[in-house]
Image (tube, rainbow, N blue to C red):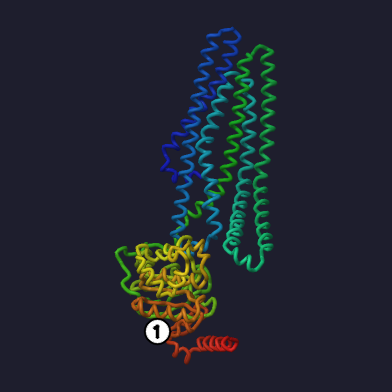
Amino acid sequence: MFSLFRYAKNYKWQAIACPFLMIGEVWLELLIPRLMGDLVDKGIANSDMRYIYITGAKMLVMAFGSLICGALAARLAAVAGMGFGTELRRVMYQNIQNFSFSNIDKFSTASLVTRLTTDITMVQNTFQMCLRMLFRAPVQFVFALVMCFRINTKVSSVFLIVIPLIVVGIAVLGPIALKRFKRMFKMFDGFNGSIQENLIAIRVVKSFVREDYEKKKFKTANDNLKDAAIFAEKIMISATPLMSLVMFSTFITVYWLGSKLIIGEQLEVGAFSSIVTYVSTILISMIFITVFIIQFVMAQASVIRIKEIINEKSDINDNEADESLKVESGDIEFVNVSFKYDKDGEKNVVDNANLKISSGETVGIIGGTGSAKTTLVSLIPRLYDVTEGEVKVGGRNVRDYTIFELREAVSMVLQKNVLFSGSIIDNLRWGDKNASEEEIIEVCKACQAHDFIMSFPDGYNADLGQGGVNVSGGQKQRLCIARALLKKPKILILDDSTSAVDTYTDSKIREAFANSIPNTTKIIIAQRISSVENADKIVVLDDGRINAIGTHEELLENNEIYREVYISQQQGAVSEGGAL
């Protein structure tokens, strides 16, 4: 927990001033019972009205001073606590943005969301509590205990038994509680994952009438979270009756000892009333300390999860990069490239790939499901790093470029098309934030997107909704391609990005590529051979290995895999034509 406090450095003065104000509040607050005892024993007992007025005035001033100190401390703690949480979120989010795909693979989306919300809220509240209780409760405890012993040692000696009992109880329960809360936060991840998946796929759920199934799945996740929370809280809940037992036993003992001493005229009534007040203060401060320890134990589980994100180092960095180096061309070369997701794994996902692509060429990639088509092209912009061999862009190893410069030169339209909340034009300007409307319209016409965009009442200013829910799959693909083209890349990678458009539109898009970006290297992953048959060369992948490279005609003649795919697709096209 304390290792994260460095992220509160921008709120240093609030964090430092708060404890001093808390100490001032406690000091003024705990002088009042002593004055009250003197007022009874000296003022009321002797009918000294002057002493009563003066002492009463002192008590009022101290109460007001304590109130001011407490209010200021509470405000400073809130500012520092919220600021600390904000800084933690910022640091975590920035580090997540630097993650490579392999880093992201370690954490589920639901887990990252939980860590950025629930875990940070827990740590933020604990930090705020720490600024107040960590100083207030111990100071209150020590000050009240000292005052008790100063008034009467015999009555106060009861704490020599009570305090060790509470310390032992906390020491036993704390580690057990920590393990249980770790388990509870894992359940939070599963619960958030269930909600997220359902809400994202709500249209699929409704179209398949699977609401009942999803309700049952949600109930299971919700019940699991409830059970884990109850299991975690049980250990802490058990401390409450034990604490109450200790409190009431202490009060009974103090009243019994105090009564005997008053009867024996060894203790005055006013002094005893002060002791009773201080005993209450001591027990309340012990409860606060216990509550803080419970909160601290709960937060410790969150701290571990937060530090996992903050301390996670990206597998891909600029350590070998030359910051002055720019990507001059779209030449690509794979030299004995092998890759596996797990470095300790036995089998390569990409195995000894050798491929040379000249700038401006159009290259098609064909292969069955799981043949590593996406993985192969992901090595070009360093979404993953090769395990063996090297990938060259513009004649240089991709590691020679900074990640920013390399990815600025590469546009990649992923298999899963992603649009963001906002207008169409805002989404398109992800490719070039300074693009003019004329440039955007020209690119959208090339991608066969302009006509459907203008069919919306607001045209390019039409709102897409979250994730682009207001457009079809084919429209979404065309918008994503247009966004990629606006970037004016040296290399354009389309990962099965026209699968949802008809063959005519597909051919028009490819025609536009040839005319509008002739010097850009174009890599097209496709399931339809018609999408790549006019490419300068086609790469056939089979189980992570390059099986063949050639033109459409060469592969039809010499490659069995390609020929089988072509024939099956031709037969399917004929069958569909007959059906029509």
Residue 263 seen from this side = yes
Q: Is residue 326 above or below residue 279?
A: below
For image coordinates 59% across by 34% down, the residue present is 288
Q: Quadrant of residue 40?
A: top right
Q: Position of residue 76 (x, y in %)?
A: 46, 36
Task: Report the number of numbered marks.
Answer: 1
For image coordinates 44% across by 73% down, the residue present is 451
Q: Position of residue 394 (x, y in %)?
A: 33, 74
Question: Quarter holding the C terminus?
Answer: bottom right
Q: Position of residue 114 (x, y in %)?
A: 55, 53
| Horizontal relation, residue 263 to residue 359: left or right | right
The 10 Å Cα crowd at callout 1, few under 14, some 14 to 19, many 20 or more, is some
Residue identified by numbered label 1: 536
Q: Residue furthest bottom?
A: 557
Q: Is residue 126 above or below residue 61?
A: below
Please name whichever residue, 447 or 227, is drawn nearer the observer in this view of the structure. 447
Residue 399 seen from this side = no
Q: Residue furthest front?
A: 457
Q: Is residue 65 above or below residue 188?
A: above
Q: Quadrant of residue 430?
A: bottom left
Q: Quadrant of residue 377?
A: bottom left
Please name whichever residue, 576 or 174, is drawn nearer the observer in this view of the structure. 576
Q: Residue furthest left?
A: 324
Please name whichever residue, 165 or 20, is drawn nearer the observer in this view of the structure. 20
For image coordinates 69% across by 24% down, the residue present is 253
Please name whichever residue, 7 or 197, is drawn nearer the observer in this view of the structure. 197
Looking at the picture, which amino acid does disc 1 mark? Asp
Q: Position of residue 465 (x, y in %)?
A: 51, 61
